[in-house]
Image: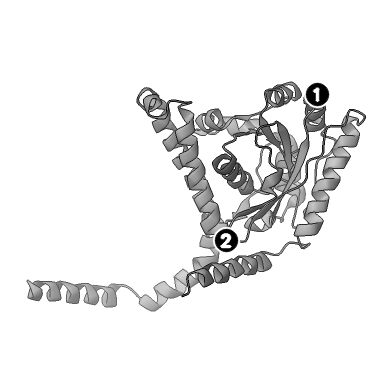
Amino acid sequence: MFSFLGDWIYSVEQFLVQYIDVDFTLWLTWLLAPVIITFLLPLVIVLLFYVTGVILYIYKFHRERLRHAYETDFWDGARKTVAAIWDAHGWIWHGYEVSGMENVPSDSPALFVYYHGAIPIDLYYFMSRVYLIKNRMIHTVVDRFLFKIPGWAIIAEAFKAIPGTVQICSAILKENNLLMISPGGVYEAQFSDSCYRLMWKKRLGFAKAALDAKVPIIPVFTQNIRESFRCVRLGRRMWLKLYLWTRLPIVPIYGGFPVKLKTHVGEPILYDPSLTAEELQLKVAAAIEDLIAKHQRIPGSILRALFERSADFEIESSRFKF
């Protein structure tokens, strides 16, 4: 038996020596490492979306059995499971934190307005954290193109994602719900940069919805979100023309870097009937810009954000020392 195993190991070693250049393989791995890190890691996020879809399909098509187990909304167990997965991913990969959780209402409506990163990974982490800690679902307004992606519809159904109009958003808020909107949307995601400039144009829908529903607006910003994923800057004018023509997020995205992410939830901007939608928009924009000025070094740096994450490792490792 041992003789056979020894012969087999020897044969494998001879094969590797004869047919595989180990030095060349190591060199090739080193050469392709930047490509793997910057362009293939975003596929992890895509995979996570489809894992989410699979989990939700399981819960949906077995809802009669699961209803007896949960005795509530049959989506609740699925949402908690998915939220736990995203929360774990944020904690492991980005050392994700939330500052200002006390500003998230426990039982009253509010409209969250946030700065849109190239990929709003912080939105998924924040929603998951709020759902797990406060047991409150945050409805979100998303671009219509997402509903054309296979597998997205069931995620949108479970997590209350809508291509909302002012009327729909107002109705959701009047039903005592939490709602989250990025006025910059895809345009800000694709064409903002490491200087974290807001790109809202003249979008006033969120302000009109908040005024109509008489709810507070809570500004939200995530530190280093532009360093986790970035859009290719080369050929910016061409990408802008294509975007204006198609209204699709076609600018290539790279990243998935394990940078430190920390979401800062600002103090609520209370309902003021004396404000117009234009005045409220300017007030909210100023509040988010203030969060950016306080918590983000401009311009953003991937290397610096990685160092901030490494500081987390030192703190975490010190907790396990005896």
Residue 239 visible somewhere in the drawing:
no
Quarter location, residue 311: bottom right
How crowded pointer 2 is (Cα within 10 Å; few <14, some 14-19, many 20+) is rated as many
Q: Which residue occupies the foreground of this view, 74 or 252?
A: 74
SS category of the residue bearing label 2: loop
Rendered location of residue 110, percent (x, y):
72, 34
Quick check: 255 left or right of 100? left
- Mark 1 or mark 2: whose residue is earlier in sequence: 1
The residue positioned farthest toward the right in the image shown: 274
What label does residue 258 carry, if any?
Answer: 2
- 213 in relation to 49, above or below: above
- 233 in relation to 131, above or below: below
Quarter location, residue 247: top right
Rendered location of residue 210, percent (x, y):
79, 29
Residue 316 visible somewhere in the drawing:
yes
Q: Which residue occupies the foreground of this view, 220 or 12?
A: 220
Quarter occupied by the N terminus: bottom left
The amino acid type found where label 1 is placed reads Asp
Quick check: 35 left or right of 294? left
Residue under the image location 68 percent in, 68 percent down? 304
Q: Which residue occupies the foreground of this view, 213 or 86?
A: 213
Pointer 1 residue: 212
Residue under the image location 56 percent in, 37 percent down? 135
Quick check: 133 left or right of 100? left
SS category of the residue bearing label 1: helix
Rendered location of residue 265, percent (x, y):
72, 47
- 183 in relation to 75, above or below: below
Residue under the image location 88 percent in, 40 percent down? 282
Q: How many numbered marks appear?
A: 2
Q: Which residue occupies the foreground of this view, 318 or 39?
A: 318
The amino acid type found where label 2 is placed reads Pro
